[in-house]
């Protein structure tokens, strides 16, 4: 791309050159880290996605070099393209932080707080968003919405109460399968995901709706309630699949494969294959190939997102780096056990002498 087609954009005081036509969100993702706004409905691999959830709002404090006026309202960064000389505030804007907290509050109005029993817990974008921007309490005094149950077939479980109507699954079915049989029925506060007449979602690529769903509204029935993601070890693996790329992440505990998903990048989106195409996987790989011997294991999967899977124990790379033990280093190699044996030190439960000496009453 020639020099003229590059636009200079500054986001949170970091300047970057991006090709004309790039959205603010994509430019921010190039910078990376916290500068990238959260995105619950935008999905770069799905055409037409974005513009639904408002979690990616940013403040444009300077429109462009030619017209430096700020934009009057916060804008959806996934749908707004950069202009040359544009200046954007994301985490440096109080207005944005405030608006994001309101968006989280709005998304949680009807969302049940069932993280303890939800299969998405630990890798849920709404959970992360609430953790970063949510409030401890709620101002909502009405009953949350309830829904008639819809059976989507043997592989995919729908929990409509958790859905945030992001449309990602609809775009996935539209763009990956021959015939979409589910969609969003009705409008406004009556809108819901359903099939028009009870139908199972059984196209060979429909399992990908599970991976794109940012919350636990669409989950894998073959994994349901079997384990928590933070107890599993994600491993990159592949197999020679006649239908899809065959490049997956296996979620193992011991030798047992509990779940198979597509590989995801740091934004929680499907990773590209080496030939630059999105690595969607077929239902056979996802639901029916759960024998470890069917796969060639490549190694532990690096987890970058700030979810509980990556927290604390693995320093961002599951299974590869042990946390550094600092206790021994500052105590000449002695472990806590050698420093103090609690049974030697504690006077509790000793003898009557101790009880009377310390004026303790027998209960
Ligand atoms: S089911 Fe999931 S992917 Fe589909 S619209 Fe609801 S939240 Fe989005
Ligand atoms: S990610 Fe931009 S509006 Fe949802």
Image (tube, helix red, strand yellow):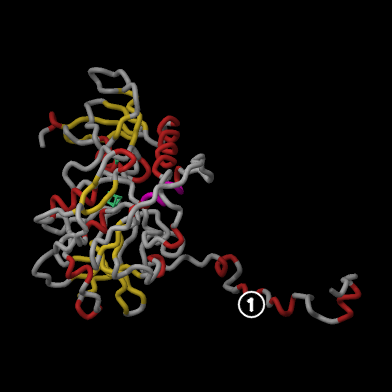
- Above-or-below relation of 182 to 341: above
The quarter of the picture showing ligand 2: top left
What are the residue bounds of the magenta stretch? 125-131
Dot 1: within a 10 Å radius of its alpha carbon, few (fewer than 14), some, or many (20 or more) residues?
few
Question: Magenta region, mostly helix, strand or loop?
Answer: helix
Q: Residue at x 28, y 58 (%)?
A: 150
Q: Is residue 356 left or right of residue 283?
A: right
- Above-or-below relation of 288 to 99: below
84 or 102, which is in the foreground? 102
Q: Residue at x 23, y 52 (%)?
A: 169
Report whether the residue tagged 1 is closer than 8 Å to ligand 1. no
Q: Residue at x 20, y 62 (%)?
A: 200
Q: Where residue 66 appears, x then y in whole percent?
A: 23, 18
Quarter of the picture containing the N terminus is top left
74 or 141, which is in the foreground? 141
Look at the numbered disc 1 and give the secondary structure of its residue. Answer: helix
* Figure disc tally: 1
Instruction: Answer whether residue 126 is magenta in the image.
Output: yes
Q: Where residue 42 appears, x then y in whole percent?
A: 26, 44
Residue occupied by mark 1: 338
318 or 165, which is in the foreground? 165
Q: Where residue 333 appears, x then y in whole percent?
A: 57, 73
Q: Residue at x 22, y 27 (%)?
A: 83
Q: Where residue 223 appears, x then y in whole percent?
A: 32, 69
Q: Is residue 337 left or right of residue 161?
A: right
Q: Quadrant of residue 292?
A: bottom left
Quarter of the picture containing the C terminus is bottom right
Q: Quadrant of residue 10?
A: top left
């Amino acid at each position: 791309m020639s020099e003229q087609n590059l636009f200079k954009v500054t986001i949170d005081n970091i300047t970057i050159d991006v090709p004309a036509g790039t959205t603010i969100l994509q430019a921010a993702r190039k910078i990376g880290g916290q500068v990238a706004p959260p995105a619950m409905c935008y999905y770069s691999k799905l055409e037409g996605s974005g513009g639904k959830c408002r979690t990616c709002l940013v403040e444009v404090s300077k429109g462009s070099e030619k017209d430096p006026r700020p934009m009057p309202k916060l804008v959806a960064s996934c749908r707004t393209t950069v202009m040359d000389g544009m200046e954007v505030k994301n985490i440096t804007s109080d207005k944005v932080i405030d608006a994001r907290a309101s968006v989280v509050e709005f998304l949680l109005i009807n969302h049940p707080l069932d993280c303890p029993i939800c299969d998405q817990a630990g890798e849920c974008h709404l959970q992360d968003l609430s953790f970063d921007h949510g409030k401890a309490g709620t101002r909502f005094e009405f009953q949350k919405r309830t829904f008639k149950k819809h059976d989507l077939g043997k592989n995919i479980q729908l929990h409509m109460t958790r859905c945030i109507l992001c449309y990602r699954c609809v775009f996935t079915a539209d763009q990956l399968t021959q015939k979409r049989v589910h969609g969003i029925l009705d409008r406004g506060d009556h809108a819901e995901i359903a099939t028009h007449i009870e139908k199972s979602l059984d196209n060979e690529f429909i399992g990908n709706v599970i991976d794109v769903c940012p919350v636990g509204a669409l989950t894998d029935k073959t994994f349901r309630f079997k384990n928590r993601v933070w107890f599993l070890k994600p491993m990159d693996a592949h197999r020679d699949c006649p239908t899809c790329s065959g490049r997956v992440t296996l979620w193992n505990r011991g030798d047992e494969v509990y779940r198979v998903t597509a590989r995801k990048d740091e934004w929680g989106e499907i990773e590209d294959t080496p030939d630059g195409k999105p690595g969607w996987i077929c239902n056979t790989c996802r639901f029916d190939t759960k024998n470890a011997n069917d796969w060639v294991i490549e190694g532990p999967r690096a987890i970058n997102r700030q979810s509980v899977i990556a927290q604390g124990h693995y320093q961002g790379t599951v299974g590869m780096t042990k946390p550094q033990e600092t206790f021994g280093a500052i105590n000449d190699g002695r472990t806590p056990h050698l420093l103090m044996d609690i049974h030697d030190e504690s006077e509790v439960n000793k003898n009557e002498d101790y009880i009377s000496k310390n004026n303790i009453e027998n209960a």
